[in-house]
Amino acid sequence: MSATVLDGKKVSAEIRAELTERVERLTRTYRPPGLAVILAGHDPASEIYVRNKVKACAEAGIRSFQSTPAASVSTEELLVLVDSYNRNPEVDGILIQMPLPPQVDAQRILLSVDPSKDADGFHPLNVGNLVANRPGPRSCTPAGVMELLRRYEVPLAGRRAVVVGRSDIVGKPMALLLLHANATVTICHSRTKDLAHECSRAEILVAAMGKPALIDRSFIREGAVVIDVGINRITDRDEVHRLFQHDPARLQAFARSGSVVVGDVDPLSMIQRSSAYTPVPGGVGPLTIAMLLSNTVSLAEQHLLS
Ligand code: NAD
């Protein structure tokens, strides 16, 4: 039986369509929801992410405010900027694009965001809300994964879930959300002893390491649901041909551009061994932005309707 593709693009479009009505209601009665985006410096990947987020806001009817301080910005200057958005009544959500320049104290900046405007759910107060399973904005990528699993009616209660990666923005919140959905959760990381063995027990396997195609056939239990969060750009011709021998379109794309994106899971093993999986690209990625918009609209509703 062939595996189900968990189509993140489709689910992202559904989520965005559902937001339209809520945005229109707020805009008609009060004002559009507002999201402030702070992008310090000129990291090329961050510039693309921010451009996509701002575009998605415009499409959803959310007003965006953008600040692009220079790479030399100080912690104090950023604190002043965040404070101005904290006090701006037209701003419902604040997003600080990571990574911040090395001289900036990122923890202090994240802590300075008003928790009621925390569009990414990174403020410790909201992390606490997540741990306690209380309402609050959730980190967008794991929240998107949960939405995908919910919409494809993947059962979680009582099932064995393994999350590989323990970062504050993906792995840890992912594990907590699965735990709150009553899965039996194991968190693996770079110091886990026998990763293949841990993963091979998973009925739900979430890979969020940033290691290209590290998870191969031997890690995947037959029939598991595999969520591949990783986004890795690879340029090595032999590696690309080894990983995408089954996918002529990808090989052609590589021939044209000299690179392709691969997740943390070997694509062919995932297709052959899982019962359902997220493709890379087009799986988890599109959900992250949809959940950012969703968080922003929810924060606006709290500010304007309650
Ligand atoms: P991170 O570097 O902060 O964390 C990586 C985690 O993986 C760490 O906890 C580390 O312990 C673990 N790890 C590293 N090597 C390992 C190994 N060999 N075995 C087991 N565990 C290992 O990364 P992150 O920010 O959590 O992102 C992870 C991946 O997800 C990256 O590829 C990133 O680009 C991608 N990502 C995608 C989206 C999306 O929208 N799809 C969003 C955020 C991150």
Image (spheres, rainbow, N blue to C red):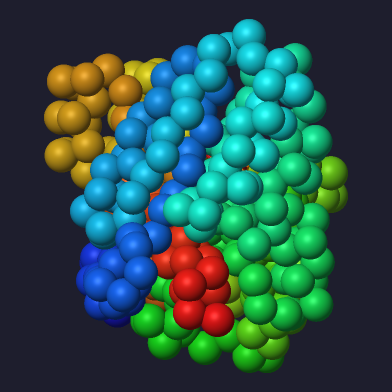
Q: Quadrant of residue 240?
A: top left
In the rendered image, the quadrant that contains the N terminus is: bottom left
In the rendered image, the quadrant that contains the C terminus is: bottom right
Question: In the image, residue 273 lies at what x, y percent?
Answer: 44, 66
For residue 151, above or below residue 52: below
Question: In the image, residue 6 lies at what x, y percent?
Answer: 34, 68
Q: Residue furthest top?
A: 72
For residue 56, above or below residue 272: above
The residue sitting at 61% across, 31% down in the picture is 81
Question: Would residue 183 be seen by someone viewing this image from the given angle?
Answer: no
> In what quadrant does ligand 1 lie?
top right
| Viewer-proximal residue among 188 and 168 | 168
Relative to 81, is 79 on the left or the right?
right
For residue 83, above or below residue 78: below
The residue sitting at 32% across, 55% down in the picture is 62
Question: Would residue 39 be seen by someone viewing this image from the given angle?
Answer: yes
Looking at the image, how many numbered discs can be counted on the residues?
0
Question: In the image, residue 296 lies at what x, y percent?
Answer: 46, 61
| Viewer-proximal residue among 90 and 293 | 90
Question: In the image, residue 17 lies at what x, y percent?
Answer: 23, 71
The residue sitting at 31% across, 75% down in the picture is 29
Q: Quadrant of residue 261?
A: top left
For residue 55, above or below residue 170: above
Q: Quadrant of residue 247?
A: top left
The residue sitting at 16% across, 20% down in the picture is 256
Relative to 65, is 130 on the left or the right?
right
